[in-house]
Image: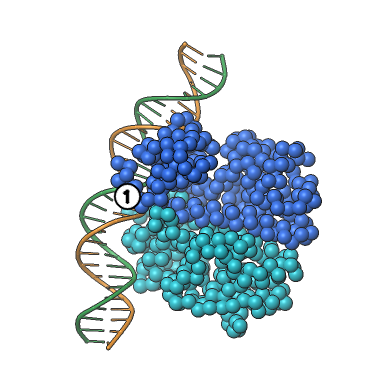
Chain colours: A blue, B cyan, C green, D orange
Amino acid sequence: MPNERRRKIAQNSLLLKSFSQEIQDMVLSMSSWREYDRGETLFLQGETAQAIHIVTEGWVKLYRIAPNGGEAVVNVFAKGESFGEAVAFRGHAYPVSAEAVTACEVMRIPSVALLEAMRKDPEIAVSVLASTFAHLHSLVSQLEQLKAQTGPQRVAEFLLELCEHEEGSCVVTLPYDKFLIAGRLGMKPESLSRSFAKLKTVGVHIKRNHAAIDNIERLRDFSETDPVEAWHKAQ
Amino acid sequence: MPNERRRKIAQNSLLLKSFSQEIQDMVLSMSSWREYDRGETLFLQGETAQAIHIVTEGWVKLYRIAPNGGEAVVNVFAKGESFGEAVAFRGHAYPVSAEAVTACEVMRIPSVALLEAMRKDPEIAVSVLASTFAHLHSLVSQLEQLKAQTGPQRVAEFLLELCEHEEGSCVVTLPYDKFLIAGRLGMKPESLSRSFAKLKTVGVHIKRNHAAIDNIERLRDFSETDPVEAWHKAQ
DNA sequence: AGGATTAAATGACTATAGTCAAGTTGTCGG
DNA sequence: CCGACAACTTGACTATAGTCATTTAATCCT
């Protein structure tokens, strides 16, 4: 039975937050919950999905191993985020594998719980769709970044997403190790390191797992500039 | 009011095919339908979605313009495919723009039609999720390809998806022009051209808009091999 | 059929990112 | 405080893909 802190985080997730109190309680009472060590596997691609997951602590990565052996990080989820909605609902095979990248806590909502909730209130389906749409949107953004931006620009955008503010300067904490950030951005750790070095010219300084951004607008400008211009600026 | 041919195609779409006859009729009676010339815009990113689209003839591309001006083709849809489910349902802004890449016919299902259908039969939501999941899955595959495969390997995979069979030889028709194929695969037309040239060494020959594949298994082998090995093979 | 227009292929060159190897820094346990 | 280990950075080199210019081929239009 989930404790209070976990309940709260799960209830605030995009998936559950618009449910009525009653349905939230029902769903949560059917859910189980587990801790994972760093590096542990939650599920593998090809397994049949029977549950939706909500991260209540730590970070979980979804990745895919291509037939040629290459790993592609599809997404990394933080506390309060859910994944696997659309798959679990249909009982399909997972198209990705999931692994704990830090020690973490994950809530597991059996798909039958949601199907039952949906029967009580068809509006539930709209919430599930909303979560799924958020994932869809995030994938579309990633595709855009990979196809239309250079490495340093993707890194800039990644940092900007971590910023709380829209302007001025700030210091952000890198949420997970650089190896994983590189994977998430579709590059090798060495390239990430070189991208960071290039960003020095637009006022970004990396120290341990913190990035100091002198001027957020300047960084945004860099990420939104044409690659060839950006190159001149970074000289 | 949709004619018979269009009805049939729409009814066979992943979105509508599992609906009961009655609900299909209701949804279709609320739908409208339009022809577009090549190059015409169906909608632009940022517009509010109020309908789901089903292609009943021709090809439609979804693309996104990055802030730096780069275009990223997110997907290209053929006859019988639907898009925009998750967005329309929520009334969000489209995250992508849509354009006719050939002259085409598109059916427009207002989201209210589906919401009403869902109220009659909550199982409808499962169909919508199924379609959405298919899109999600396709995006995940694309990400994997971009992150973990070389250009020629992506082209090989693209050709394999067009094949009807699993083995032997075959001739496939390139569904749209090379400029668009290049965009879909995240490369420039010149690179696509060079990729085709490399695929000659694994028995692929391009003539006009047809690709002759001598041996499907050999091509699959190429697309699934480690990039460095693939390089030696293609020498 | 023939010239005009567009699509595609090729060549030369550059940039961007990957690879491999060596160095640096930081962390943790004793 | 020191050594061992891991994470990260840097350097040299290579490959892969992008850019720009040019050639070749295909299509269109009277």
Spot occupied by residue B34 in the image (x, y as percentages of width and height): 53, 78
Reply above or below: A33 against B164: above
Spot occupied by residue A210 in the image (x, y as percentages of width and height): 48, 33
Horizontally, residue B187 falls left or right of residue B14, namely left
Residue at screen point 30% across, 41% down: A235
Image quarter for residue A175? top right
What subunit carries mark 1?
A: A
Residue A30 visible in rendering: no
* Residue carrying label 1: A229
Spot occupied by residue A67 in the image (x, y as percentages of width and height): 50, 52
Image quarter for residue B70? bottom left
Residue B147 visible in rendering: yes
Residue at screen point 71% across, 74% down: B23
Q: Nearer the viewer, residue A45 or B81?
A: B81
How busy is the neighbourhood of tag 1: few (under 14 within 10 Å), some, or many (20 plus)?
Answer: few
Q: Nearer the viewer, residue B137 or A125?
A: A125
Residue at screen point 70% across, 59% down: A125
* Secondary structure category for the residue under label 1: helix
Horizontally, residue A197 falls left or right of residue D4, namely left
Q: Nearer the viewer, residue A66 or A82?
A: A82
Horizontally, residue A193 falls left or right of residue B133, namely left
Q: Residue furthest front?
A: A168
**Three-letter amino acid code at the position of disc 1:** Glu
Image quarter for residue D12? top left
Residue at screen point 61% across, 83% down: B1
Query: Which quarter of the figure is the C terminus of chain B placed in?
Result: bottom left
